[in-house]
Amino acid sequence: IRNKVRKIINDIHDLKTFQFQRKIFNNHTEDFELWIFVDANKHAIGVACYLSDGCQLSLIYAKSKLIKPRKIVSGELLALTMGANISQILSELLNPKRVILWSDSMDNVKRLEDDINKYTYSVAVHLYNIKSKVAHVRHVNGKNNPADAFTRGVMTRELHQLHRLNVRDIVQYPPCLF
């Protein structure tokens, strides 16, 4: 336990000097999309928001929240709702060409394609909220979902790795830009 505590304290000290590059993309562009990744486990939900130029993803915002223990599929629905709410705010600020909400919860991605009236009221309210704020919801492989880091926690060195990502490392068949 002593080694774990020492490791955490050292990582907290590393955060004092932690910085991201201010430059979002290597080349100037006004054509970008907002990609929002969400994830959940039994105890937390996480959102990672990136800007994409079609080749590269740059982290611009991330958020984690502890939740009451629940089934994973329910937590994933809460994460999708939080992602949709964040997407609305960031869209107004950034004016992206398109917003895509990514989840590794195939069950919830399919729910969003269905008629929401066939679900219980509480689930339907979440589905309606998400659908009213985000037009594109896609599935991402759980191993590639960057929001996973924000549900389990990461060390500072891992956070550096999450800042800039290659689109093809995350999504095998990325949607065409525009």
Image (cartoon, grey):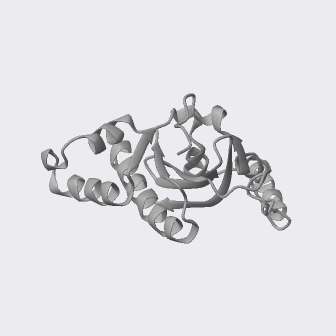
Tell me: residue 54, above or below residue 84. above
In the image, taking residue 88 as reference, residue 2 lies left or right, namely right
Q: Is residue 40 visible?
A: no
Residue depicted at x 78% and y 51%: 27
Tell me: residue 72, above or below residue 50. above
Tell me: residue 109, above or below residue 78. above
Residue depicted at x 35% and y 50%: 77
How many numbered circles are shown?
Answer: 0
The answer to which quarter of the image holds residue 48 is bottom right
x and y, in percent, of residue 40 in the image: 46, 48
Residue depicted at x 28% and y 57%: 126
Residue depicted at x 59% and y 52%: 150
In the image, taking residue 87 as reference, residue 21 lies left or right, namely right
x and y, in percent, of residue 144 in the image: 59, 35
Q: Is residue 19 visible?
A: yes
x and y, in percent, of residue 146 in the image: 60, 44
In the image, taking residue 141 as reference, residue 56 lies left or right, namely right
Seen from the viewer's position, the closer of residues 31 and 122 is: 31
The answer to which quarter of the image holds residue 94 is bottom right
x and y, in percent, of residue 23 in the image: 79, 60
In the image, farthest residue toward the top: 172
